[in-house]
Amino acid sequence: MTKFYELSTAERIAQLHTEGAIGDDDLRVLSDEPALPTAVATNMVENQIGNFPVPLGLADHFVVDGEALRVPMAVEEPSVIAAASNAAHRIARAGGFRTSVRRDGITAQIVFMKDDSSSRSDNGDENVSVQMPSQVRQVNKNADGFAINNQQNHDSLQSDNGGLMTFVREHEAQIRKVAHDAHPSLQTHGGGLRKIGVSASAEGFSEIDLLVDPGHAMGANVVNTIAEAVARYCAERLGGLDLLMAILSNDARDQRAQSEARIDFDNLPTRDMDGEQVARRIVAAARFAQISPLRAATHNKGIMNGIGAVVLATGNDTRNINAAAYADLNEQRRTWTNWTIDKKHRQLVGNIDIPLPLGSVGGAMSTLPMAKLSLKFLHNPDASRLMGIVASVGLASNLAAMRALVTRGIQDGHMNLQYKSLAMSAGARPDELQQIVAGLRADPAKASLKTATNLVNQLRNTLK
């Protein structure tokens, strides 16, 4: 039986249609007609002049929590989809990925600073300057979400910062009503304001933190709408404090996805190394990423190759995911993955734990035809399910990259598809690609656009 990756694009689409994975309307979306009509595009961004297509492919062999999936990935870099598929196949033989998700909500910050209007000079010029805090004091919160750090912090809030904690305690019911009224439909979708917190910094800033469950949406617009409504309500009733801003935080520590994968040693060997040796080298490479900032940056890029491609394909916000993921790292935790050896079961074990504030409804997900189709390929998951799938793709991409690195080197797999890119850049037609790629592969040291162009010209001259 012909493997999926060996089919032509038309044959792949036909097979998906035969399998029932796509319908007649989806066929039209996948045709050569524009996937994004101008009438849609011009209302999504300012000054729209066209569309910027990125190849959409399917990573095969994924089994996530017992469900077999072909995962849509939008990416321009050669080998990303092939590598993820290869790793997923090895993982599937041991049962696939097992995921867990925590989706508590998004935090919005309503930030105040001391009202220094009385410090102005007679001519209206400012006599003081406000500096952004270099380090905000971390505060503990009780079960209701209120800051209860220590007496010094409490005194600061009471005196220097206008008694913000007392205000919030006394107006909690009204604040919750304002939040609800700002977006009433959110509660019907299972979301809403979950917690209210208060904190302060040594530099004179104080804030109200709102933890908002956005339902199955990513929730940026919803959370910002609620934050601004609550901010207006509080600012109108607080004296001595100047409202500075109200905005969600892209630090998504309350929206995390974990995935675990196991790979039998027997599914890891190369021609030159047995599976256990490969597994131990992968564990060593993962450990090196934890201690080397230089390596960690590239290690993490390999993870994001997979994550970013699925995020883009499903119409989610790639910038939001990048901000959330990298905000989670520090000198003690330089990457999101961990790899160990299970001696008893002779398996390599990988884990990923990463913030993924994703949505499955709303915004571009409900507007872009390709995004809607991508979610259909994933069996229209809810937001939590999508988080688990995306985390699994990141883990698979990490495995593929490290296995290549510690065995044959990263370029071997990369270059096969890079040769195709060079051939196409040189103007090779589809029926000429195979011969041009073979010519480039014959002398890798001289593979370049100039060489590819010469090979195209030679081929065509031969056929005259």
Image: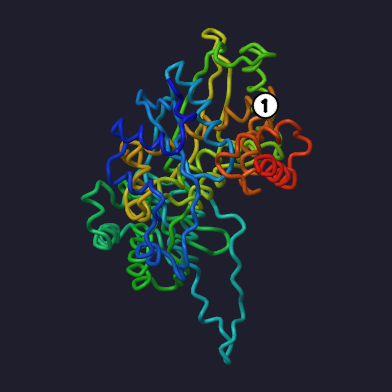
Is residue 385 visible from the viewing direction of this image? no
Quarter of the image with the C terminus is: top right
Q: In which image quadrant can residue 220 be found? A: bottom left
Is residue 124 visible from the viewing direction of this image? yes
Residue 424 to residue 173: above or below: above
Q: Residue at x 62, y 49 (%)?
A: 427
Amino acid type for the residue under numbered disc 1: Ala
**Is 421 placed left or right of 222 in the picture?**
right
Q: Residues within 10 Å of mark 1 (few under 14, many from 20)?
A: some
Residue extending furthest left? 188
**What is the x, y in percent for residue 64?**
40, 27
Residue 1 to residue 245: above or below: above
Quarter of the image with the N terminus is: top left
Residue extending furthest front? 464
Q: Viewer-proximal residue, 462 or 194?
A: 462
Question: The residue tagged with tag 1: helix, strand or loop?
Answer: helix
**What is the x, y in percent for residue 336?**
55, 35
**What is the x, y in percent for residue 145?**
37, 48
Residue extending furthest bottom? 123
Q: Viewer-proximal residue, 253 or 154?
A: 253
Question: Which residue is labeled 1 in the image?
Answer: 285
Q: Residue at x 51, y 82 (%)?
A: 118
Residue 425 to residue 447: above or below: below
